Amino acid sequence: MVKLLLWGLLIWLAFKYLPPLLKRFSTHSTPQDAPRDPNAQDMVRCAHCGVFVLRSEALFQGDLAYCGETHRKAGPNP
Ligand SMILES: [Zn+2]
């Protein structure tokens, strides 16, 4: 009977303390704790065709971004 209680205690301790330890030693990183790439650029979506373009290469008209001059002239696609 005592043996069974000891096993129960051991299993309980394993479940209580192992996950945080594994988390600490794991090399797997989640996107939240990965440092942001300083060279990464924001992407914006063309209001006409929906394609994603770099913010630096997008054409803006008001709040709307466009992938090119033709789509900027065509305006937003409903
Ligand atoms: Zn477009």
Image (cartoon, rainbow, N blue to C red):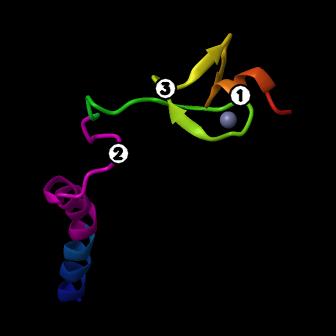
The residue that disc 2 covers is: 31
Q: Earlier in the sequence, mark 2 or mark 3?
A: 2
Give the residues in magenta: 13-35
Give the residue type at disc 3.
Answer: Glu
* Most distant residue in the right direction: 78
Is residue 5 or residue 75 the one in the foreground? Answer: 75
Helix, strand or loop status at disc 1 = helix
Classify residue 3 as left or right of residue 29: left
Is residue 1 or residue 69 the one in the foreground? Answer: 69
Q: Is residue 38 above or below residue 32?
A: above
Give the residue type at disc 2.
Answer: Pro
Q: Earlier in the sequence, mark 2 or mark 1?
A: 2
* Most distant residue in the top direction: 62
The residue that disc 1 covers is: 70
* Most distant residue in the left direction: 25
The residue at label 2 has a CB less than 8 Å from ligand 1: no
Q: Is residue 52 above or below residue 69?
A: below
Q: Are marks 3 and 1 in contact (CB under 8 Å)?
A: no
